[in-house]
Amino acid sequence: MTAASAVDPLLARDLAALAPPGLLIGHRVILPGDEHALFDEEAAPIASSVIAVRRASGAARIVARELLAALGYAGASVPRGASREPVWPVGIVGSLAHDDEVAVAALARRSDFASVGIDVEAALPLPPELRALVATPQELLGSRNDPLREKLLFAAKEAVYKAAFPLDRIFLDFHDIEVDLAVGRAVTRTGRVLALRHRVSTHVLALALCAHA
């Protein structure tokens, strides 16, 4: 395996376009053997015996460790918290995500952002049975002309949840998050406002950012 084999050039381009100043984003194509990258404290909470789950988690942490090293935290682990959220070193905020093919990570210093959330999804339409679960009728306006709009709404709300939960410690359902893709903003039922960035090409990407008050 070479370093180049773990990189998707088009995805790298899209992630670079997604990241604002102060935020690091990386990715990795998930490869056999990535499951062995999990440190003991990272592997223990991942009880699944399904190799794909452990492999994707390992790939995400390979990316995270590369970004952490760039911020001066070489060799740091990223275990899971009680609510399955990644636990970052003191002074760092971040988020992990993966689909069946790639894993991504987004990290920043806490001094630059209060919280970060990222999601990556396959560029395939959302199953019809999930439309009403994920989005409101208002959010779905325009979906007839954009077959990936519903998947983008799904990814955006996943990213928002990942960014909001570390701050509020409150579970949010999809309908607890209102998304305005045109404006690039999301609001949770708790009143928290987050900035949204998104990109759709080889994958559906969504990034949620919470600035300091």
Image: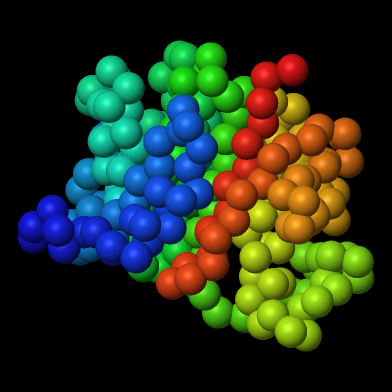
Question: Where is the N terminus found, in terms of image quarters?
Answer: bottom left
Q: Is residue 139 left or right of residue 48?
A: right
Point out residue 51 in the picture as x, y percentages from the top left corner. Answer: 32, 62
Point out residue 201 in the picture as x, y percentages from the top left corner. Answer: 48, 71
Residue 204 in which image quadrant? bottom right
Placement of 19 over or under 107, stated as above or below: below
Placement of 147 over or under 107, stated as above or below: below
Residue at the image point whose x is 30% and y is 48% from the top: 58
Point out residue 210 in the picture as x, y percentages from the top left corner. Answer: 67, 31
**Figure coloring:** rainbow
Q: Is residue 142 left or right of residue 160?
A: right
Residue 173 showing in the rendered view: no
Point out residue 118 in the picture as x, y percentages from the top left corner. Answer: 54, 47
Placement of 18 over or under 64, stated as above or below: below
Q: Which of 87/101 is in front? A: 101
Q: Is residue 193 left or right of residue 210?
A: right
Residue at the image point whose x is 67% and y is 82% from the top: 147
Question: Where is the C terminus found, in terms of image quarters?
Answer: top right
The residue furthest left is 1
Q: Which of 23/6 is in front? A: 23
Residue 44 in which image quadrant? top left
Residue 19 showing in the rendered view: yes
> How many marks overall?
0
Q: Which of 76/46 is in front? A: 76
Placement of 20 over or under 137, stated as above or below: above
Residue at the image point whose x is 31% and y is 43% from the top: 63
Residue at the image point whose x is 76% and y is 58% from the top: 182
